[in-house]
Amino acid sequence: MTDLPDKTDRKLGLVIDLDTCVGCHACVISCKGWNTENYGVPLSDQDPYGGTPSGTFLNRVHSFEVQPDQGAAQTVHFPKSCLHCDDAPCVTVCPTGASYKRAEDGIVLVNEDACIGCGLCAWACPYGARELDRAAGVMKKCTLCVDRIYNENLPQEDRLPACVRTCPAGARHFGDLGDPDSAVSQLVADRGGMDLMPELGTRPVNKYLPPRPKDTGGEIDILAPLLAPVAEEPKGFLGWLDKTLERL
Amino acid sequence: MHPAPSVILFTALSGLGFGLLAWLGIGRPDVTGWVAFVFFFIAYALAVGGLVASTFHLGNPKNALKAFSQWRSSWLSREAVLSVAALITMGLYAIGTVFLGVQWSALGVIGAALSLLTVFATSMIYAQLETVPRWNHPITSALFLALSIAGGALLAGQVTAAIVLLLLAGGVQVAAWWLGDGRFAKRGSTMETATGLGFIGKVRLFEPPHTGGNYLLTEMVYVVGRKHAARLRVIALLCMSLVPAILLMLSHSHVVALIAVLSHLTGVFAARWLFFAEAEHVVGLYYGKR
Ligand code: SF4
Ligand code: SF4
């Protein structure tokens, strides 16, 4: 049934550090790679080598520019995938029961064998986390690499979502956000982790760590006053040259 | 939102068909035998035709039967269940009126109620979506029901009722546009809330995730053709409501009635196209669009 569980035993999810993400898209590629070869139908591409390439992705990295009232603008790279919401509107709209949220760990999944490809769940998701695969006609979304994290055939260090395992900047963290003592929960508490579009009441499990404050561009060095230019106006030969050139 | 022709056809035709069934269910027009057959035939052709059209936009229709299972939580599933219940109930009622010359009026009333509930369930598929603020309002259901009942009256030859209801439906449509235009701003979702970066300053898209298009953009960030919206609204309102109402006031002949029906249908198609094309999904904010 596509009713949501009253509560989940754990809340597995991601914590994404917007301060650290360098926008390299490595997580996008590793996600596409793993999920094309594993859970469900492959993530297809349409016209991949032609003029209008497009394809199915479960994780996309946007880049935003933020302009403060004063000072320089700032670029923020912004990876986005399913947030495994506690109050997932994508689950309750599903007519077939294909979409569900697991009571044991809170992961939101699609059972492709039951999906009719109506697309309503993608309409219900505020975050653009679901994409209908154009080749297979079924809904695809982040599985939190459910086929890695519990996979005993993999070495311990690989039992992480592919995106987390691959991130060269260490900007992605995986863990149980329902346990206040877990490393990810601590990180969220320390850094003021935030929800996306909280006004829509989806209660996302994934959290985003805001960029740390930037330098404001004041004094660069305590010796700076000593380095100030001694002569404001050029004198002597340079002064003569300056005046002569101005007259020309 | 992408105005898919199959969905426009489905919602418009099935709305009309179930509207006609509702009128037939309460015995208006009071017909039996062959005349009743013709009325029921038209109603079923519209309602079933619309439902069949709706399966065209499914990516994986072979699982369609599963869509009857989640009526506890899903309006789409409720619509499926209600539509079949309405069609079966009205089918039994039709057998009585067409072949036996009897009107099982209790059955008819139940069938009429189920028909309108089906239209309500269709409207809720859209009205429930918090992600599309323009739709996320009771006026969406009022609009679908008003159009269905008015169109049904038109097809059922209920002239006086049709005139009043067509004008009323036009009024609901104007109210829906009026309320709808401000809904996105009222919902309060912005690029700042979408990214959580508003505490730093004003957010704009620097680079989209991919240079090419994707499913989200074609399906939910449809911005083509909105610039003609104002003109289309006028055309829709005229064709759907005013023209047929005036035609019915002028003459009761079958030809005029047919023109009124065609005009109404054209207007409903135009209005339904706008219903989708003008609806902005919050996901557009991540793409710097609405
Ligand atoms: S992010 Fe979207 S797809 Fe994922 S659980 Fe939330 S609403 Fe559903
Ligand atoms: S596309 Fe599939 S998973 Fe999504 S609502 Fe429709 S049937 Fe459910």
Image (cartoon, grey):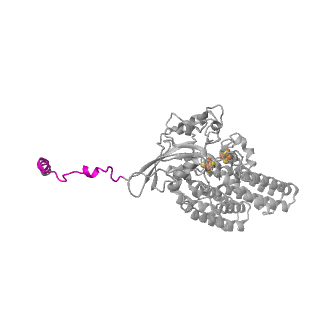
Image location (x, y in percent) of residue B210: 50, 42
Whether residue B110 is visible to the viewer of this picture, yes or no, is: yes
**Location of residue A49 with respect to B20 vertically, above or below:** above
Q: Is residue A220 or residue B29 the one in the foreground? A: A220
Which residue is painted at 68% across and 57% down in the image? Answer: B124
Read off the magenta span.
Answer: A217-245
Image location (x, y in percent) of residue B146: 68, 63
Question: Residue B110 occupies which quadrant of the picture?
Answer: bottom right
Which residue is painted at 79% across and 63% down in the image? Answer: B26
Horizontally, residue A163 falls left or right of residue A227, namely: right
Q: Is residue A98 or residue B139 the one in the foreground? A: A98
Image location (x, y in percent) of residue B39: 77, 56
Circle count: 0
Whether residue A93 is visible to the viewer of this picture, yes or no, is: no
Image location (x, y in percent) of residue B152: 72, 60
Per the image, is B130 magenta? no
Per the image, is A227 magenta? yes
